[in-house]
Image: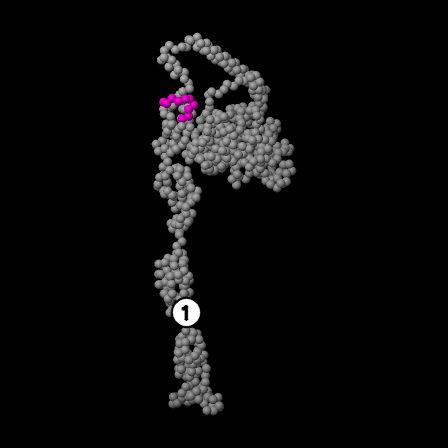
Amino acid sequence: MLKIGMFLGNRYEIISKIGSGGMADVYKAKCHKLNRFVAIKVLKPEFSQDQSFVSKFRMEAQSAACLSHPNIVNIYDVGEENGIYYIVMELIEGITLKKYIERRKKLEIRESIEVAMQVARGLEAAHAEHIIHRDIKPQNIMISKDGKVKVTDFGIARAASSQTISSNTMGSVHYISPEQARGGYCDERSDIYSLGITLYEMLTGRVPFEGDSTVAVALQHIQGEMVPPRQYEQLIPISLERIIMKCTQKKPELRYNSATELIEDLKKSLTMPNEDFVKIKQLSSDSPTMIFNGRDVDRIKNETRARTEYDRRAEHAYQMDMEDSEYRNRRDRYGDDDDEDDDDDDMEDTDSRFEKIVTYIGIGVAVVIVLIIGAIGLRACGLFSQTTKESSSAAESSSDTTKTKVINVLGMTYDQASSALRDAGLSIKATYEISEDYPEGQIFEQDLKEGEEVDRSTTVNVKVSTGSGQLTIPSGLTGMTPQEAAQALATAGFTNVSSSYEEENSDSVAAGLVIRSNPDSGTKADKTMEIHLVVSKGPAVVEVEVPSLYGMKEEDARSLLSEKKLTIGDISYESSDEVSSGKIISQSPGSSNKVSEGSKVDIVISTGSSSVKVPDVRWSSLSSATAKLRDAGLEVEVEYEESSSSEKDLVVSQSPSNGSEVKKGTTVTIIIGMGSYETEPATTQAPEETTQSEDTGDQGAGQ
């Protein structure tokens, strides 16, 4: 077992273990030479000592290394180091198709077809190099993160020659072809069978055959009838079901001859899903006799004897429903000598049986020849002449094997009718149409009437019902995402939901969600009718004209804007000489502009005029003048000057003069009179005299 961090070939550093198979373990590694991550498949230690397994392991690398295709995992290198045999291959970042199916339960129809086409393209490239995979199954199909599909693990693939090749039942028993289950010969059509089973599982989420043991499942591949996939999933198109049925025919000659043919039909199923274009050949009972000469007999015997010890061991383990390791334990316990003797006895028995069969065939042919010669002689002697017209007519009628009568197949399924008509010597061709009277899958019309006598091998054209074309469009689509609504319609049976959406404004449904379907919920429509979904774009944008708010009070403006489905925005205040206080001076957006409903309009409200008249304060005392001016919103500055005695301590003048209009806050200068004086000293002593006078007055008052 490899350890994390060790190197292989001085180049590949082991990073982690990512998987394990029957013969090998798979590791993630880094190639330090090319600086990239790779996957390394390492042969398990218990097999590395067995030269047969080592040979097969090397054969895998040799057969797959020559393949270079986008849908096949690339092989980069192969090597051996200290008894460790390994293959270096492309590392796929993703999951197996098996895990993908388990997560999704079942895949969508288009997705399943795309996966099958990519796998078929990979097989097409391998088959062109005469390489058969032999183990196609979801576990060996990788889906990368970018959606690429790649076939991996050519673990039991071998280069096919022009001669037949004996195969072993080593692939997963749920997907192997009948010829592999029998341990017989297989070719490219065996891979097509396994791909058909894989496609069946992708569409239905189940494999067609189940059993308690591998032997039980294998026997069903050989003998069992497969349940048509449409019985599990009715949405599967008719053409796709027919493709699966053709891929999984018991007889290889009835399957697709190549992956190329399969790809062509898969492409058609994308554009013509309900057309019956898949042609499945009918087995003929009048095939020519095959003559074996001596060389042919010797060749068959030699090929039988040429089977390797590995082939015998694998086949024996499969038939006994045992693991290979258990078989080796039994071999080690009891030895191989008896087995070799048994094999020799089996060969002798095979030779004896074959010689007996050839002898019996020869005797039978001789008897037939004698009877034919005798009949000719008797006819020549007239012993077979008829005695009456009635007997002659009866004899001709009974001996006429080229005619047959048409049977009634109405109400049968296609497979039932095909089998019944084949037994009657007739073939069938079907078209699929809507029928209100017959359930889906039943034949409701045939072109030849029951009892009509026709030539053998005549084709009976039938029409198969696809069910009633009228389905009810489900309710409850409103409010779903488009993907959820499309899935609900598909579940209801509608097969043609448009991938493009109609869009409408809606005040009740959020943007991106379904408003309704077209036709609407509750109505009936053909199942194939194209259904359109109407998706919401959210509320509609309606433009309105902004009204003029100039000169209005705030409450009146709010009422008017509400009628227009607009609202008040920011409010600011300014003085105005033209607009009285409390009314709107200006607005933004302005009147007559168009805005969407719900928009806001900003307004400016007047605080009143910004200018005042200067009051007349002349002959007022200082305190009285100051109060008047400040009440008018003006500032005061006081100055003093000489004046007559009558003007002392009163305002003798003002600037600006009374009646002037000025802005609020303007400074008004007032002049206070100080009385009249004749001499300069008197002027300087006036304050002292005033004090004395005031004192005298006080004294007089006191007296």
Assign the N terminus to one quadrant of the image.
Answer: top right
Kind of residue at disc 1 = Ser
Residue located at (52% from left, 32% from top): 260
From the top left corner, tell me how far across and down residue 157 is, in percent.
56, 29
Q: How many marks?
A: 1
Range of residues picked out in magenta: 451-460
In-front residue for pair 178/251: 251
Residue 213 belongs to the span the image colors magenta: no
Residue located at (63% from left, 31% from top): 83
Give the residue pinned by disc 1. 575
Residue located at (48% from left, 21% from top): 287
Please, what secondary structure does the residue beneath circle 1 have?
loop
From the top left corner, tell me how far across and down residue 10 is, in percent.
65, 38
Residue located at (50% from left, 35% from top): 117
Residue count near mark 1 (Cα–Cα under 10 Å), binned few <14, some 14–19, many ≥20: some
Question: Is 618 positioned to the left or the right of 39 in the image?
Answer: left
In-front residue for pair 303/502: 502
